[in-house]
Amino acid sequence: MAKTSSRRPGTAAVIGTAAGVLVWSTLIERRLFTIRRHTVPVLPAGAAPLRVLQLSDLHLAPWQVGKINWVRSLRNLNPDLLVLTGDLMGHTQARPALLNMLEAFSDVPAVFVHGSNDYYGPRFKNPLRYLKEPSRLATREQDIDNAALTHGLEGLGFIDLNNAATTLELRGTELELFGLGDPHIKLDDEAKMREARESLGASDAAVRIGVVHAPYQAALNSLLEADASLLLAGHTHGGQVRVPGVGSLTANCDLPNRQSRGLSVWYNAHTAAYLNVSAGLGNSIYAPVRFACKPEASLITLTAPEIPRAS
C-alpha cells in the first residue's frame, strides 16, 4: 500500500503537465500571433532601407476572424513589399475571406507563390507519418479553384511568381524577384523561371530575391544559382511542435531541421544567400496545435552593409 501511495503524486504531476501542454498548444499558443523581425544587409551602399513583410501558411478558414483582423492590422507596419509564400488557403471556401483580408495591402507592391494547400483542401493525416517523412500528396482530385485564387490575388495588384519573374523599383533600388511553383507537389519549373528572367533583362545591379513555398534543397539551389541574395520560403510551420532545447523534429521536406524556422544562410561551393523560412500563421484545421512555435509573420528590413569606421 505504501508503494502505491508514493507513486500517486508523480503520476498526478505527469497527468497535470500533459493536460496543461495540451490546453496551451491547442487553445492558446496557436492564437498568439507574433512578428519575427530580421535585418538583412543585401542592398547596395547608400540605398534606403526596405521593409519586406512575409506572410506564409495562413491555412485560412472562413471563421478565423481573429487571424483575419490581426493580418489586416499588419498594414500599419507600412511595408515596402509584401511577399506571400503560399498555403494561404486552409478551407475550400476560404477564398472570399482571404481576398477581403488581403485587400488591406492592395496599395502595397506584392508578389506571391502558391503552396499545395492552394490547390488541395485539408484532410486528416496521421501525425506520426508527418514526423516520419514529407507529406507529399498522393494523386487526388484538385478541390480548390487555384485559377480563381490566382485571378483574385492579381485583381488586388499582386504579382504571380510561380515559375515566373518580375522587376520592381522600391525607394530607388531595383529588385528582381523570381519564384518557383511548389516543389512539394512537383510544380517547380526551373526552365520556365529562367526563361521569364531572361525576358526581363534586369540590370546587373538589381538586388535579387528568390521565392518558393517549400524549401526543398533542389529548389533553393536553383534560386541560389540564379544569383539570389535572399531566399524566402514557408511550408515547414517551423516544425509546428518544437522541443525546448532541441528545436524542430521535422521540416516536412529535405531541409535540415535546424533551418526550419527563421533566418539562416544557404550556400553551395561558389556562393551563398540569406534564407528566411517563415513558421507561418496557421495550421491544418485537422491539426490545431502549436507548441514552442508561435504563429508568425516575418518583417525583414533590407539594408546596405555597414562600412566599418576608420579608427
Image (tube, grey):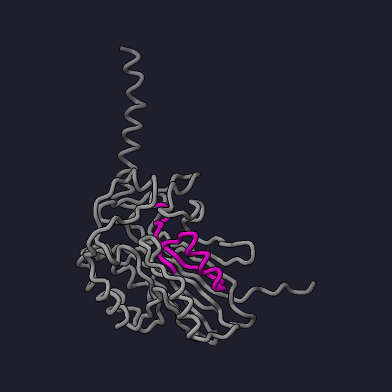
Q: Quadrant of residue 237?
A: bottom left
Q: Is residue 259 above or below residue 222?
A: above
Total tally of numbered discs in the picture? 0
**Residue at image coords 41%, 59%:** 279
Furthest-front residue in this view: 191
Horizontal side of 225 relative to 80 (left or right) equals right
Q: Is residue 243 visible?
A: yes
Residue 306 is covered by the magenta coloring: no
Q: Tell me: 157 left or right of 211.
A: left
**Residue 98 in picture, x, y percent from top left:** 27, 71
Q: Position of residue 203 (x, y in %)?
A: 57, 86
- Give 13 or 213, whichever is nearer the viewer: 213
Q: Which residue occupies the foreground of this view, 291 or 190?
A: 190
* Direction from residue 34 to residue 15 in the image, left or right: left
The answer to whether one can see residue 296 in this image is no
At 32% across and 35% down in the image, what residue appears?
16
Please state, as top left, top right, bottom left or bottom right, where the C terminus lies in the image. Answer: bottom right
The image position of residue 53, as x and y in percent, is 43, 72
Q: Which residue: 32% across, 29% down?
A: 12
Q: Residue at x 49, y 66 (%)?
A: 37
Residue 161: image x %, image y %?
A: 40, 76
Q: Is residue 79 above or below residue 33?
A: below
The residues colored magenta run: 212-239
Residue at the farthest right position: 311
Q: Quadrant of the N terminus?
A: top left
Q: Hey, which quadrant is residue 151 in on the image?
A: bottom left
